[in-house]
Amino acid sequence: VARWTIRVPDPYGNLILERAFRSQGSPGPEEAVLGADHRLWLGIREVSDRLTWVVLSPGGEPEARVSFPVFGRILAADEERLWVSETDAAGALTVVRYRISEGG
């Protein structure tokens, strides 16, 4: 059984995180990014080469799941965009903006 701990200043916040991950059977997050819109993006490694990001609303309810290959790191996020730092094969760092849209 994987153990994980996230410290949130308010006790209600810890209950929100516990409920979100236990309800999905997840081992817990590897990364966390607080969006400009107060959504919390939590990165979970479900397979070795991909991170799935669970997006929690400002009230702590799961709103979305986004999965993509581990190629960079989310620097910032809001409801419509992600800013990701990516490193190419030559080691050059680039900041890329992605548009978020619904659908599959």
Image (tube, grey):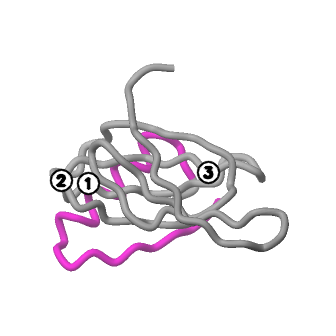
Q: Secondary structure at mark 3?
A: strand
First reached walking from the N terminus: tag 3 or tag 1: 1
Q: Is residue 22 above or below residue 14?
A: above
Q: Quadrant of residue 41?
A: bottom left
> Mark 2 or mark 1, which is nearer the start of the sequence?
1
Badge 1 vs badge 2, beta-carbon distance below 8 Å: yes
Q: Residues within 10 Å of mark 3 (few under 14, many from 20)?
A: many
Image point (36%, 47%), residue name: 81
Query: What residue appears at the point 31 percent right and 65 percent down from the top-left corner?
Result: 34
| Nearer to me, 89 or 17 | 89
Residue 37 in the image: state x and y as whole percent.
19, 55
Residue 23 covered by magenta stretch: yes
Assess whether mark 1 and mark 3 are in contact (beta carbons under 8 angstroms). no
Tag 3 residue = 51
User: What amino acid does circle 3 point to?
Assistant: Leu
Q: Amino acid at mark 2?
A: Pro
The stretch in magenta equals 1-26
Residue named by callout 1 = 39
- Quick one: which residue is furthest to the top in this view? 104
Task: State the CA–CA distance, disc 3 to disc 2.
Answer: 21 Å
Q: Which residue is mark 2?
A: 58
Tell me what residue is drawn at x 68 percent, y 47 percent.
Answer: 69
Q: Is residue 8 above or below residue 32?
A: below
> Viewed as shown, does residue 65 lie left or right of 78?
right
**Split into 4 quadrants, where in the image is the N terminus?**
bottom right
Please state the horizontal and vertical placement of residue 92, each as a whole percent of the image.
Answer: 72, 72
Q: Say left or right for 57 vs 50.
A: left
Residue 103 covered by magenta stretch: no
User: First in sequence: mark 3 or mark 2?
Assistant: 3
